Image (cartoon, grey):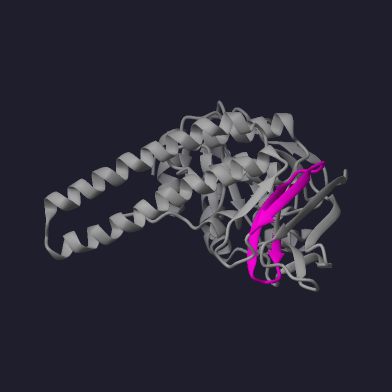
Amino acid sequence: MKQLLTASALLASLSLFAQSTPKDFTISGTAKTLQTNDKVYLEIPGTQPLVVLDSITVGSDKRFTFKRKELDEGTVYQVNIAKKQRFIVLIEGGENIEVTADGTENGAALIKGSANNDYYQKLLGMYKVMSEKSVKWQDEYAKAEQKKDTKKIAEIQQAFETESKDFTAKVKAMIPEMGTSLAALFATNFLNPEMEINTIFELAKKFEKERPTMKQGQIFAGNAKRMRGIQIGDAAPEITLNTTSDKPLNLSSLRGKVVLIDFWASWCGPCRQENPNVVKAYNRFKNKGFEIFSVSLDKDKTSWIKAIEKDGLVWPSHVSDLKYWQSAAAQTYGVNAIPATFLLDKDGKIIGKNLRGEALEKKLEEVLKVNN
């Protein structure tokens, strides 16, 4: 049976970056166990080493207040109560958050002042219920397996499936309410990407349209594109990147030829090992209407050019934005490992993916109607 991810693991997927339009926010509160001279910290969770942004020494009123400028359109913060209790606060700027906490390791924390945090707490509550049921089922499942009780095993599996579908349906129903918020991004962590890619991708498009400068949204949209990828039968999206001569080159400029889009990099060992096969295919079919459009995921231009020369990649179409895995083209095509290739017919439609060596040559023989 599949185990649910922990809340801390889900939060780790929300990377944090700065933006150019800071907004003021305040996080104030108290905890039952706080004493005068105790320290409360404002942190960024999931960082190694832990990033501590601010700290305050509690006075006789046993309260704490953090007043800061939000350096992004959305950041996940962690409040650390005297190193006894830690809890998450979602901030997008402009909030006045009021916290009432227990101040103990597994204590509760009531967070008021924003819809983001209301949704976050609701999601955690739903997750807790599902997680507790999952633990119970896993225990029952193990016992049933020992007894070889196939009927009980089937019942547990059915119960888990039903509850999982119900949980997913509730999360999906909440996402439209949350709009383009941090809470909406957090909610997608509870969805199975393979089963719910359409929901995730639609939300990504919404972030791109409504909050194009939100760094968290940009990362989410990029990841969503990678998850969705490009399928055989799809029209190949346009790629416009600079060549080694810093001149823009369009993929569509090769329309009318059978084109292999080859995602690679100078630092990629498997790519360099495959390059002789790519060179062989090019030399064999270049006069038959075949062309290669190489997209490098390099960061260093010099290394990129040296690899092209050393490996004898003599075709003219070499492009890169030198953005490593943040390459716009790689995100659009759903590339999360290289080498990765897409074979296009003369109309720019995807007719093959990740064909290498002999498989690539056989496909080209078929498409270009070339005999052995």
Measuring 35% from the left and 53% from the top, which residue is drawn there? 134
Would you say residue 360 sits in the magenta stretch? Answer: no
Percent of width and height locating residue 133: 35, 51
Q: Is residue 254 above or below residue 33?
A: above
**Front one among 17 and 266:** 17
Q: How many marks?
A: 0
Percent of width and height locating residue 21: 88, 43
Q: Which residues are magenta?
A: 79-101
Q: Is residue 254 above or below residue 277?
A: above
Measuring 79% from the left and 47% from the top, which residue is drawn there? 72
Identify the residue at the far front of this view: 60
Q: Quadrant of residue 104?
A: bottom right
Q: Is residue 371 left or right of residue 296?
A: left
Residue 245 appears anywhere in the view: no
Q: Quadrant of residue 268?
A: bottom right
**Front one among 70 and 205:** 70
Q: Is residue 241 left or right of residue 339?
A: right
The secondary structure that most of the magenta stretch takes on is strand
Q: Quadrant of the N terminus?
A: bottom left
Measuring 67% from the left and 72% from the top, which residue is drawn there? 83
Measuring 57% from the left and 66% from the top, which residue is drawn there? 269
Q: Quadrant of the C terminus?
A: top left
**Front one among 107 and 179:** 107
Q: Is residue 300 above or below residue 293?
A: below
Q: Quadrant of residue 74?
A: top right
Q: Is residue 5 above or below residue 243?
A: below
Percent of width and height locating residue 341: 53, 47
Residue 367 appears anywhere in the view: yes
Percent of width and height locating residue 223: 60, 46
